[in-house]
Amino acid sequence: MGKQKEIVEKSVKEVEEVVELFYQQKLQEALDKFETTISGMMTAIDTLFTFRAEHEGFVFDEVKITNTLKEAMEALQNGDMVLLADILQYDYLEYMQEVLENME
């Protein structure tokens, strides 16, 4: 497996852990972990841009991921942690899993 795919997988795993903490209603622990996870998410997204530039035919919808992150930040700012967890789970993670499957 390539280094780029490993970076994305590591980020996905971290986000999955954050989502699980939110769903377990461990709010402070989830927020603390999310704070450190954000930089990994940005690194993973940067890695996907690089991967796309290097691999013709690799599809990465930057508009979709940007909109998802905006929605997540709005939920966070509004204090809606259930919505934040849902956005991370059903929009971000599901899309990132799809992207990972295409990183060959």
Image (tube, rainbow, N blue to C red):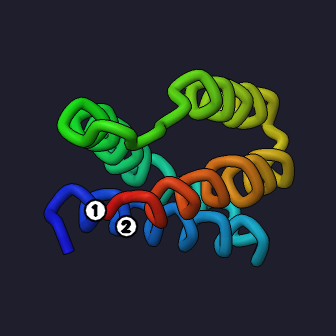
- For residue 79, side relative to residue 57 (left or right): right
> Which of the two residues, 45 or 31, is positioned nearer the viewer here?
45
- Residue placed under numbered mark 2 in the picture: 9
Q: Which residue is drawn at 44% across and 66% down?
A: 14
Q: What element carries label 2?
A: helix
Quadrant housing the N terminus:
bottom left
Quadrant housing the C terminus:
bottom left
Q: Is 101 drawn above or below residue 48 in the view shown?
A: below
> Which of the two residues, 56 or 14, is positioned nearer the viewer here?
56
Q: Which residue is drawn at 67% across and 74% down?
A: 20
> Which of the two residues, 11 or 22, is positioned nearer the viewer here?
11
- For residue 48, side relative to residue 27 (left or right): left
Q: Which amino acid does label 2 sit on?
A: Glu
Residue 32: x and y, percent?
A: 49, 56
The reply to whether the C-beta atoms of the residues labelled 2 and 1 are less than 8 Å apart is yes
| Residue 42 shows in the view | no
Q: Which amino acid does label 1 sit on?
A: Lys
Q: Residue at x 73, y 29 (%)?
A: 71
- Residue placed under numbered mark 1 in the picture: 5
